[in-house]
């Protein structure tokens, strides 16, 4: 079983910054990719940013140039630096990790952390 623990959400004014962290723990042999998704009430969960173990990154168009995803492979931790935040960034942000448990693949989700951007 793989657990993801997120931290760093909160309330910030428009134009401000927040940094999210997500640490993976448990039983696994490798993590292939980690990422962040977000969801607002009544909407589907959407991709924000992902990063592979080879540090290839992918961003949603809406956050390009404002958000930066990074990863510490030694700590099995992924970060999301969010700058120039906008009210439309308000959502619950979920961490995701995908990898292998000595053969079988896994995908795990964190419990979510609220990010609220006031105008």
Image (cartoon, grey):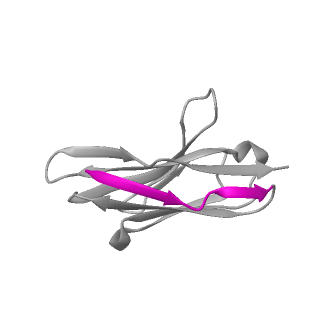
List the single residue furthest toward the left: 103
For the question of whether residue 65 can be seen, the reply is no
Residue drawn at 32 percent across, 44 percent down:
107
Quadrant of the rendered image containing residue 29: bottom left
Residue drawn at 67 percent across, 57 percent down:
10
List the single residue furthest toward the right: 119
Q: Nearer the viewer, residue 7 or 99?
A: 7
What secondary structure characterizes most of the magenta part? strand
Q: In this image, 27 relative to 17: left or right?
A: left
Q: Position of residue 16 (x, y in %)?
A: 77, 62
85 relative to 104, above or below: below
Residue drawn at 44 percent across, 58 percent down:
5
Q: In this image, 7 relative to 97: left or right?
A: right
Count of numbered badges drawn on the protein = 0
Quadrant of the rendered image containing residue 71: bottom left
Q: Position of residue 28 (x, y in %)?
A: 22, 57
Q: Position of residue 89 (x, y in %)?
A: 70, 46
74 relative to 21, above or below: below
Residue extent of the magenta highlight = 1-13
Q: In this image, 54 relative to 29: left or right?
A: right
Query: Magenta stretch containing residue 80, yes or no?
Result: no
Residue drawn at 80 percent across, 59 percent down:
15
Q: Position of residue 23 (x, y in %)?
A: 41, 63
List the single residue furthest toward the top: 42
Query: Magenta stretch containing residue 7, yes or no?
Result: yes
Q: Nearer the viewer, residue 67 or 110?
A: 110
For the question of whether residue 15 can be seen, the reply is yes
Q: Nearer the viewer, residue 29 or 54?
A: 29
1 relative to 20, above or below: above
């Amino acid at each position: 079983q793989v657990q993801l623990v997120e931290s760093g959400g909160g309330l910030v004014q428009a134009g401000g910054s927040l940094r999210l962290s997500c640490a993976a723990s448990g039983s696994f042999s490798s993590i292939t990719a980690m990422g962040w998704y977000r969801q607002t009430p009544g909407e589907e969960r959407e991709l924000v940013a992902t990063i592979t173990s080879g540090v290839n990154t992918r961003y949603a168009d809406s956050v390009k140039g404002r958000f930066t995803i990074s990863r510490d492979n030694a700590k099995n931790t992924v970060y999301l630096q969010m700058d120039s935040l906008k009210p439309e960034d308000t959502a619950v942000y979920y961490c995701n990790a995908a990898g292998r448990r000595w053969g079988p693949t896994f995908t795990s989700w964190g419990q979510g952390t609220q990010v609220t951007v006031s105008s």
